[in-house]
Image: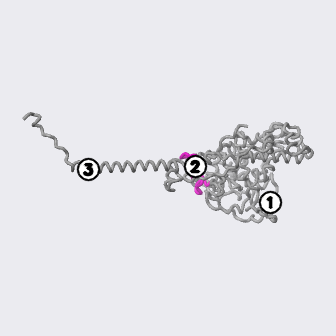
Amino acid sequence: MSELSASPTPSSPSPKSRAPARPVRLVLRAAAAVLVAGLGFCAYAVAFPAHVPEAVGEVVENLTGANPHPVVLQRPPVAPLSAMAQLGKQLFFDPSLSGSGQQSCASCHSPDHAYGPPNALDVQKGGLAMTQQGYRPPPSLMYLYRQPNFSIGPDAGENDDAPTVQQQASASANVVKSQKTAGGPSTSVEMVPQGGLFWDGRADTLQQQAYGPLLNPVEMANKDVDSVAQKLQQAPYAKHFNELFGSRIFDNPKMAVSEAMFAISRYQVEDPSFHPYNSKYDRWLEGHARLSQAELHGLRLFNDPDKANCAGCHLSKPGKDGLPPMFTDYQYEALGVPRNRNLAQNQDPKFYDLGVCGPFRSDMKAQQQYCGMFLTPTLRNAATRTVFFHNGIYHDLDRVMAFYNERNTDPGKFYPHGADGKIDKYDDLPADLQKNVDVADAPFDRKFGDKPAMTADDIHDIIAFLKTLNDDPAPSH
């Protein structure tokens, strides 16, 4: 036999030895199909988190920052400005209406700065020579069209026998203010002032608010209403007054100025740049944007009643009517912020800005339970600001958050020491009114020496979330 013929012939595998291959292939194919289906479901869940089970949607939210519960927000209709609003726009940007000829509404309410101050000054300067300090930092004019009128307790509606504000205040003088918690029910609306414009709520309408700076000696500093009317009559747009209000409108200076202020208010109501609702957070609410991990964590801290508890006053959820959240409850709080000794008015040690109790409104002076309370502003576009609180004491959100976090646990960081070496806490309020300061709502419920409610990383993430409340810049004016 040859070598070849002597070699053993490989035996063909028997049918039995090949049998296991088919089940293995079937298992592999089934596993691959399951994997593909799983990947497909994951991709679907990531793309459409609102269309998967809630538990899955929450996982997607945690991983990607998508909103698993999107809503449809109701925004104001956009339409061309009326003739009245167009006139108001001209008035808004006209510096000739000031005593100095250098200050318009837009000087302190810059459209490039969310209709707030255009700089980091504690307060803005005005007056005839533009050298006098204002009394308080100008609030933003954005979203004010939804601001309710000033009242104490629930809205009395159209009741002709509704009690006066003073009567409402007196009736609730001895009622203990309820605690505010983020996301929780609160009856504090029954106990505290609410609504109104300016830091103390002394104006109810945008028309009234527009009047304020005109005759203020440290702002637009006009001598009287007649001098304002004369400026309107000499302005290039005077012909529009005749077209809108008749040829004899300037025969009555008071009426002419009143119509001018109404025109400014119509501009603020009609122009979309005052209420665009186009922030990243608005888009996230509607499922059109994703939050970063820091922003998402910041939102949760913002809403956490045991942590930042911001949403206790700055409501973050859309209303049942679909209106976007305004990030304010329109109420008033006494926070006890430190005295700003850079303000000219505070050089007088006997002067105190008591907000609702005065000095710029007098009707609530006797209601001492509200002294030291100031309006809770919206936090929309707050991260664009460079001056905070009613006296402009702080100039960045880091310092603001530190104050909220450690005002009570480490007050020496914020308040001066007296001659006796003790911390002069709540130094911008007389001693007998310091009892009005909020010490019930988190994080103000902490005591001296306690661990603060938030860590430095927590504050970083909350500020990251607050930046999602910034609207896209307004068109150039």
State yes or no: discs 1 and 2 in contact (Cβ < 8 Å): no
- Residue at the spot of label 1: 366
Residue at position x 57%, y 49% in the image: 287
CA gap between label 1 and label 3 equals 94 Å
Closer-to-camera residue (251/164): 251
Residue at the image position 65 percent from the left and 47 percent from the top: 400
Residue 264 picture quarter: top right
Q: Position of residue 61 (x, y in %)?
A: 52, 50
Left or right of 20? Residue 228 is right
Residue 237 highlighted magenta (yes or no): no
- Residue 388 shown left or right of residue 250 in the figure: left
Mark 2 or 3, closer to the camera: 3
Give how far apart the Cα atoms at labels 1 and 2 are.
49 Å
Q: Quadrant of the N terminus?
A: top left
Per the rendered image, the range of residues in magenta is 286-309
Which label number is shown at residue 20?
3
Label of residue 287 in the image: 2
> Distance of mark 2 from mark 3, alpha carbons?
50 Å
Q: Amino acid at mark 3?
A: Pro
- Pointer 2 or 3: first along the chain: 3
Camera-side mark, 1 or 2? 2
